[in-house]
Image (tube, coloured by chain):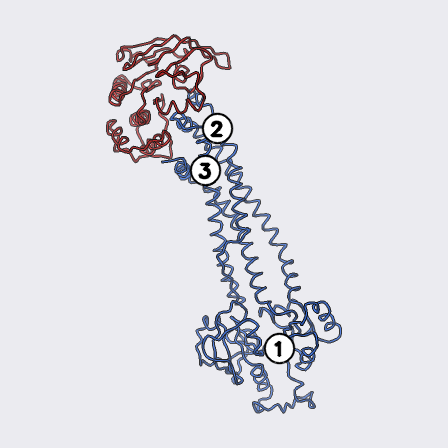
Chain colours: A red, B blue
């Protein structure tokens, strides 16, 4: 499903990253773990098509990302990838539900039932009509998961989803992510420095 | 949900900064549109009352005053002239038609004009109820007068001397309302019109307390000889046979007689030039306000773009294209400027209503029109231009935004 080869990226300020090859089969989740400064965020952005590598190849769902134009990447992303950020981001002028509707609009979809299902599944259905800045930290995290999965992506990329959480909540969130991925038929790749997560994944890559 | 709705939600999410730009734009557009409206309305009203009058003859004095008093009925007359002299001029071969008018009295501030019947035809006045006057002391009442003062057919009006309400009242000056005029959107709406004879009678009676009503034995102290010579009129409205006469004839009168001839169209354009300067200054100020509103809009968008860079990046990672995001920024700006334009027009209409009510109180004039002027479409164009220009730089920055970098900094 995901195959990377000889992936390299260098920033203009001379920072250079060379990533080990990844080969992930369908129906498997993956944990990518590494210390600060080894290029975790860079790798995630490469996988999400937000950055383009200088050399090497990324094959995602049999498509070569490095051969796509920026607009093809936009469209590939909205159809295949959901991203959970380290810090949840929302459109602040919109309610939780409207944020999800916006995501659907961008992907040319409209399905209020799915929004309802997802919010119920994540236990924040009663917050549907709240502005996102009125949510608690935990609710924000769950709402950002909802935003990542609303368009039924085949791949969920999560960037440091647990770094600011205590052990108890850390376990809860990662199980929640795994459950959402299974419930909605997506694969999950988590990128983190948080070694507590190792025990939750069969496949682990250390950068 | 779509990009347009999102723009509107974004505007309402920041009511304070949005409303400052909006208020400036409303003020700028409002002032310009108000000036345009007032200018056009006053000009229309003035032109409307000018039709069929090429020249006015009256007593010596300010020509503008003569025009304002005898064409627009808003200033005091320059004085009276002798009936006989006016009659002589009206017989000149260059004169197509002439109407003699005379003032004397008012009823509760509305002028009572003695005039030949042609006067009503000049303004296309039509009797709505009742009939024309036949005898002296019978009057036709203009639409605004009977609406305001609730005058009905058959009422008796006791007039006061002079043109102001405070004048001494004539005990004998009781007029009978025999007809009500339809609204004609001209000066006769605010006049009470009667035969010249009525006005002469009243003042004769007043001067010679014991004299008979109809006989003009007229034993004035100064003039014993002539029978009709002492009759006076206030002014005479003249239409020429040929428009060419407008150059020559007024000069002849001004040079060769002790009367004054004034050309309304010339005096009015002089008047407009006079206060046109003020209007121009004020409209420059208003354009400046519009430009400032553009700057405020730009700063507004620029700041909010920086505040919202994470949410822009988020929208991009959700798959929105660069163009969609830039469009959103331009939409936000356009929604503000177009609503600023619409509210500005509304503001100017309220302004017109306000000015009109002021003018009606002091001058018995009213202006009301809600049609959109061509120049106002031009203002719409300007508002849209301001909206696009002030959002251009923010929109380009959003277009060139590096989402990966923004997200990595988070």
Q: Secondary structure at mark 1?
A: strand
Tag 3 and tag 1, C-beta contact below 8 Å: no
Q: Is residue B62 visible?
A: no
Q: Label 3 crowding class (10 Å Cα cut-off): few <14, some 14-19, many 20+?
A: many
* Quadrant of the image containing the N terminus of chain A: top left
Q: Residue B354 in the image: x percent, y percent?
A: 49, 59
Looking at the picture, does residue B354 appear above or below residue B140?
above
The residue that appears at 65% across and 77% down in the rendered structure is B80
From the image, tell me which residue sits under label 1.
B100
**Measured Cα–Cα span from mark 2 to mark 3:** 14 Å
Residue A186, by quadrant, is top left
Mark 2 neighbour class, 10 Å CA radius: few under 14, some 14 to 19, many 20 or more: some
Task: Kindly report the distance in space between the C-alpha atoms of the residues bearing marks 3 and 1.
Answer: 63 Å
Q: Chain of mark 3?
A: B
Q: Which mark is residue B331?
A: 3
Residue at 49% in and 56% down: B371
**Looking at the rendering, which quadrant does residue B36 occupy?**
bottom right
Q: Is residue A176 visible in this depiction of the protein? A: yes
| Residue in the image at 30% along x and 25% along y | A152
């Amino acid at each position: 499903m995901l195959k990377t080869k000889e992936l390299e990226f260098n920033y203009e300020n001379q920072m250079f990253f060379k990533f080990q090859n990844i080969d992930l089969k369908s129906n498997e989740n993956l944990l990518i773990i590494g210390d600060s400064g080894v290029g975790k965020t860079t790798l995630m952005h490469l996988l999400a098509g937000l950055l383009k590598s200088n050399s090497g190849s990324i094959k995602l769902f049999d498509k070569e990302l490095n051969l796509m134009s920026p607009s093809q990447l936009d469209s590939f992303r909205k159809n295949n990838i959901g991203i959970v950020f380290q810090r949840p981001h929302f459109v602040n002028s919109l309610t939780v539900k409207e944020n999800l509707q916006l995501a659907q609009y961008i992907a040319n979809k409209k399905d209020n039932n799915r929004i309802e299902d997802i919010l119920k599944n994540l236990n924040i259905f009663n917050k549907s009509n709240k502005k996102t800045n009125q949510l608690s930290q935990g609710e924000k995290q769950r709402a950002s998961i909802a935003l990542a999965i609303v368009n039924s992506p085949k791949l969920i990329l999560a960037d440091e989803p647990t770094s600011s959480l205590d052990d108890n909540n850390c376990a809860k969130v990662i199980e929640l992510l795994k459950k959402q991925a299974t419930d909605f038929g997506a694969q999950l790749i988590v990128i983190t420095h948080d070694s507590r997560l190792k025990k939750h994944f069969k496949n682990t890559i250390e950068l | 949900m779509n990009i347009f709705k999102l723009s509107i939600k974004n505007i309402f999410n920041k009511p304070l900064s949005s409303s400052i730009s909006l208020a400036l734009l409303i003020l700028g557009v409002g002032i310009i549109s108000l000036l345009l409206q007032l200018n056009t309305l006053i000009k229309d009203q003035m032109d409307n009352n000018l039709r069929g009058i090429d020249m006015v003859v009256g007593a010596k004095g300010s020509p503008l005053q003569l025009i304002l008093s005898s064409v627009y009925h808003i200033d005091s007359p320059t004085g009276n002239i002798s009936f006989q002299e006016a009659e002589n001029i009206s017989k000149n071969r260059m004169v197509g038609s002439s109407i003699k008018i005379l003032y004397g009295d008012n009823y509760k501030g509305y002028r009572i004009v003695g005039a030949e019947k042609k006067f009503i035809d000049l303004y296309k006045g039509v009797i709505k109820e009742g009939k024309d006057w036949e005898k002296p002391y019978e009057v036709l009442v203009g639409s605004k007068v009977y609406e305001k003062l609730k005058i009905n057919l058959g009422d008796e009006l006791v007039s006061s001397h002079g043109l102001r309400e405070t004048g001494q009242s004539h005990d004998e000056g009781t007029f009978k309302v025999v007809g009500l005029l339809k609204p004609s959107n001209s000066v006769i709406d605010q006049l009470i019109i009667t035969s010249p004879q009525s006005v002469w009678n009243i003042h004769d009676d007043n001067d010679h307390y014991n004299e008979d009503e109809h006989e003009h034995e007229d034993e004035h102290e100064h003039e014993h000889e002539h029978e009709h010579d002492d009759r006076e009129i206030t002014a005479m409205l003249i239409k020429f046979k040929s428009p060419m006469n407008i150059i020559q004839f007024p000069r002849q009168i001004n040079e060769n007689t002790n009367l004054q001839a004034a050309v309304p169209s010339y005096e009015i354009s002089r008047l407009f030039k006079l206060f046109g300067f003020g209007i121009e200054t004020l409209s420059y100020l208003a354009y400046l306000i519009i430009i400032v509103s553009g700057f405020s809009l730009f700063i507004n968008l620029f700041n909010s773009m920086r505040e919202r860079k994470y949410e822009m990046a988020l929208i991009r990672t959700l798959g929105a294209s660069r163009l969609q995001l830039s469009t959103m920024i331009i939409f936000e700006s356009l929604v503000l400027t177009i609503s600023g334009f619409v509210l500005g027009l509304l503001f100017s209409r309220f302004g017109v209503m306000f000015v009109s009510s002021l003018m009606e109180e002091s001058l018995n004039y009213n202006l009301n029109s809600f049609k959109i002027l061509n120049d106002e479409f031009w203002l719409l164009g300007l508002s849209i231009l301001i909206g696009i220009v002030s959002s251009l730089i923010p929109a380009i920055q959003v277009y060139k935004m590096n989402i990966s970098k923004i997200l990595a900094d988070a």
